[in-house]
């Protein structure tokens, strides 16, 4: 395969599409599968039972598919699955899953993963997210589509971050973040709705107004969490434009396991 640099070490059992490029001194393990158009830069290590889709770009010094940093892991054949069109910058680390969860770490499509980001074992990251430099996920963290994690933020294990949420720089996150909510600080606190992000993604004024009304019920009404959940059902019925968005928020609240930032 002419796209593989002579100094790269690719195990003959690895499955690489003929269009895959592998740079100097990179190492590809025997249980790796890589789809068409993916570019693996120099000094990248991809190991473990790792499946990578098409049109991804891995920059130098990434460590992909390494053993989970979990003492309970006993060598089980767990997996890492990466979708299509992701940009994965320098020194990013992504670990395999563990048998204590579903046995897989997942990254969706069209994500921008900046330098020094860590995706720990059993994390599930959706699509179209942005991780700024040094954003760190502990194990079992779930991140929804279009979420943005700013530089140096740290996320505690088992936390969930909803779709379109925004996590500010240096935030220490130990609880779940509902969809559309902007949080920052140490400890993290809610700062409003991620309005600018929603505008950039084509949300209408009516949708944003409905989401803001839901946010006020959850954070500014003085209601308990259970009372706010009931109020959100009523708000969903009143807000035709944002009904689906409010329902997404309600569904998230029903699955939150660490309590929400509130």
Image (cartoon, grey):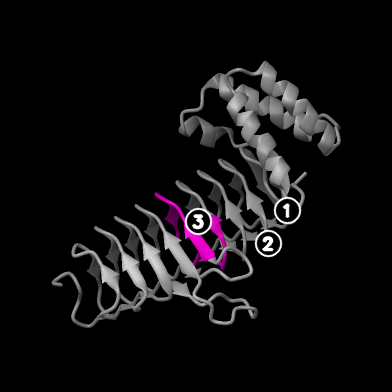
Q: Secondary structure at mark 3?
A: loop
Is 242 above or below relative to 76? above
Residue span colored magenta: 104-124
Name the disc covering residue 175, or none. Answer: 1
Q: Is residue 181 visible?
A: yes
Contact flag, marks 1 and 2 (Cβ < 8 Å): yes
Label 3 and label 1: CA atoms lie apart by 20 Å
Relative to 42, is 218 on the left or the right? Answer: right
- Count the marks: how many? 3
At x 58%, y 71%, the residue is 98
Between label 2 and label 3, give the one nearer the viewer: 2
Give the quadrant of residue 247.
top right
Relative to 72, is 205 on the left or the right? Answer: left
- Report the residue marked by disc 2: 156
Pick the residue in front: 178 or 98: 98
Residue 167 lies, in percent from the top left, at 61, 49
Label 2 and label 3: CA atoms lie apart by 17 Å
- Mark closer to the chain start, 2 or 3: 3
- Report the residue marked by disc 3: 132
Between label 3 and label 1, give the one nearer the viewer: 1
Residue 116 lies, in percent from the top left, at 49, 67
Is 209 above or below relative to 63? above
Q: Secondary structure at mark 1?
A: loop
Is residue 118 covered in magenta?
yes
Residue 222 lies, in percent from the top left, at 86, 32
Is 200 above or below relative to 66? above
State the residue lying farthest toward the left.
Answer: 2
Q: Is residue 115 visible?
A: no
At x 74%, y 52%, the residue is 257
């Amino acid at each position: 395969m002419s796209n593989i640099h002579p100094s790269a070490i690719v195990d003959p059992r690895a499955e690489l599409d003929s269009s895959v490029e592998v740079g100097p001194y990179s190492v590809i393990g025997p249980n790796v599968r890589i789809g068409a158009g993916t570019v693996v830069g120099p000094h990248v290590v991809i190991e473990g039972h790792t499946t990578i889709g098409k049109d991804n770009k891995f920059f130098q010094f990434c460590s992909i598919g390494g053993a989970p940093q979990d003492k309970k892991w006993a060598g089980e054949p767990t997996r890492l699955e990466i979708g299509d069109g992701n940009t994965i910058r320098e020194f990013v680390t992504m670990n395999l899953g563990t048998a204590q969860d579903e046995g897989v770490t997942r990254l969706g499509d069209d994500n921008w993963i900046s330098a020094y980001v860590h995706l720990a074992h059993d994390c599930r990251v959706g699509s179209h997210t942005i991780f700024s430099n040094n954003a760190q996920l502990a194990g079992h963290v779930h991140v929804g589509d279009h979420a943005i994690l700013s530089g140096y933020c740290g996320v505690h294990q088992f936390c969930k971050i909803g779709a379109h949420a925004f996590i500010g720089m240096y935030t220490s996150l130990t609880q779940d973040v509902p969809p559309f909510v902007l949080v920052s600080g140490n400890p993290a606190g809610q700062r409003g709705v991620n309005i600018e992000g929603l505008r950039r993604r084509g949300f209408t004024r009516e949708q944003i107004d409905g989401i803001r009304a839901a946010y006020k019920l959850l954070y500014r009404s003085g209601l308990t969490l259970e009372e706010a959940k009931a109020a959100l059902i009523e708000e969903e019925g009143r807000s035709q434009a944002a009904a689906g968005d409010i329902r997404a928020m309600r569904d998230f609240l029903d699955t939150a396991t660490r309590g929400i930032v509130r």
